Image (cartoon, rainbow, N blue to C red):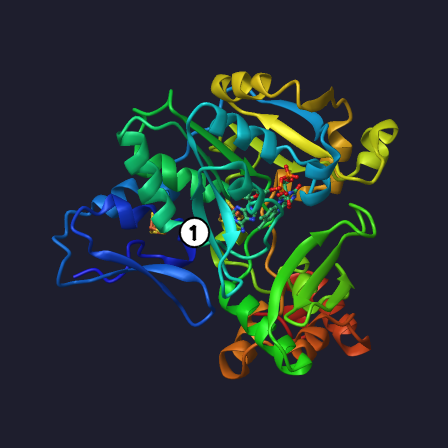
Amino acid sequence: MRQTVRSNPSECTGCGACVSICSHHAIFMQANEEGFLYPVVDASLCVECNLCEKRCPVTQEKPWPKQSAYGAYCKQEEIREMSSSGGIFVPLAEEMLKRGGVVFGAVFDEQLLVETVGAFSPDEVREMCGSKYLQSAGADAIGNAVALLKKGVPVLFSGTPCQIAGLRAAAGEKFAKQLITVDFVCHGVPSPGVFRSYLNEQEKLAGQRIVRYHFRDKRKGWKDFSAVMMYEDGTEKAAGQWEDPFMRGFLSNLFLRPSCHQCRLQGRNHPADITIADLWGAQVVCPERDDDRGLSLVLVNSSAGRSFLEAVSGRIERFKISDTDALLRFNPSIMHPAAAHPKRQRFFESYIQKGFEQETVNALLKPPGRAEKALIRIKRVPGAILRRLGLGKR
Ligand SMILES: Cc1cc2nc3c(=O)[nH]c(=O)nc-3n(C[C@H](O)[C@H](O)[C@H](O)COP(=O)(O)OP(=O)(O)OC[C@H]3O[C@@H](n4cnc5c(N)ncnc54)[C@H](O)[C@@H]3O)c2cc1C
Ligand code: SF4
Ligand code: SF4
């Protein structure tokens, strides 16, 4: 009797599609010791039809034939200000509301964990603004979106590329006219358990609860963004992206989901109609546009995406990009999955025992000392020489 959906759990993205694919309600999501959600099969309900595994998006690949790339930003300054990049998501979402549809996107819950929910009004859409750098729980949203599509309601679903692949696997092809999907260039998702544990440590240090967390505050500009936490007494603590220990760990790939390190949903493999991203490298690619308030890279992956973007053309400024090599240099996630930090395992050994400790993160990420540098040099020596020195694997 199966207990998990994929025989190799490290491939599972946690999209949650299998939860709604299973009509026997035999699958639920549960956090593992690293703090990531994985599907668990209730053996007493499973009839071993294997539908979950057959339709799991990890085994399916569907490259889009043609893709166009633009630079863009929202003309409304207040929207651009509250968004991580150029604020392209809000006009797209509001266009869907105008058409009588529902918008799915990621919001914080009361624990400051992230879940994907449906929005019916512009105010609810604004809560989705801004990147939250931890994996959102999306299984219920996929089920709810499919139920709405079946009732004829138009849906815009935004999420990680693997969540969009999950939605497509759960919905099938028949709702193409009602469904618009928006994903992003994805560096990978950190563990929700690690993030909560980090907040617990910070709350203990401050002696009070954190009530809001902003990963991409633009007070010092778009490129040099800050992570800002707000406490219940109204005070704030802001740290630069490389000072905040959680952001440092995220950007150094210390606690990303294992599937992110083998992800293939980049380049032309984005499963969404529209892909949004930061236009990193704007100072080289389009210096005349770079006012450090945020610019988006927009990839259009389908004809449905093209006409949806056209529909919001009055609200956004859009321009062509010619130096695509520079784009890839500044934003490697456009084409490649992030490699795991060599000390990922050591981080999780400590996390499983003691929870998140900023001291541990700082120690693991400190620049290598002399002894470590010498070891790295030894590892780069060809295997044959190492074997002759009696150091390499035989
Ligand atoms: C985990 C993660 C990794 C990313 N990695 C990169 C990268 O390597 N390179 C790059 O150029 N861009 C990356 N992005 C995208 C980038 O940060 C912006 O979100 C994107 O440019 C859109 O910006 P915006 O200003 O149009 O809209 P914003 O208002 O900033 O974006 C909001 C949208 O992002 C969605 N969202 C936010 N957090 C999550 C989450 N945890 N899970 C699912 N959906 C979420 C919301 O639902 C909404 O649709 C990443 C985003 C996330 C969440
Ligand atoms: S459908 Fe998604 S959550 Fe389920 S096994 Fe496949 S990748 Fe994992
Ligand atoms: S890197 Fe790939 S597997 Fe990881 S969250 Fe992003 S799309 Fe999903």
- In the image, the residue with mark 1 has its CB under 8 Å from the nearest atom of ligand 3: yes
In the rendered view, tell whether residue 356 sits above or below residue 54: below
**How far across and how far down the image is residue 203, in percent?**
62, 77
Describe residue 179's horizontal placement relative to residue 65 as left or right.
left
Is 233 in front, or is 93? 233
**How far across and how far down the image is residue 163, in percent?**
44, 43
Q: Amino acid at mark 1?
A: Thr
Q: Which quarter of the rendered picture does the C terminus lie within?
A: bottom right
**How far across and how far down the image is residue 349, in percent?**
53, 78
Which residue is pictured at 55% across the width and 18% down the height? 306
Describe residue 136's horizontal placement relative to residue 212 as left or right.
left
In the rendered view, tell whether residue 82 sits above or below residue 391: above
Q: Which residue is mark 1?
A: 13
Is 372 in front, or is 253? 253
Which residue is pictured at 66% across the width and 56% down the height? 214
Q: Secondary structure at mark 1?
A: loop
In the rendered view, tell whether residue 294 sits above or below residue 110: above
* Displayed quadrant of residue 320: top right
Q: Which quarter of the rendered picture does the N terminus lie within?
A: bottom left
* Displayed quadrant of residue 276: top right
Describe residue 77's horizontal placement relative to residue 189 as left or right.
right
In the rendered view, tell whether residue 21 sits above or below residue 240: above
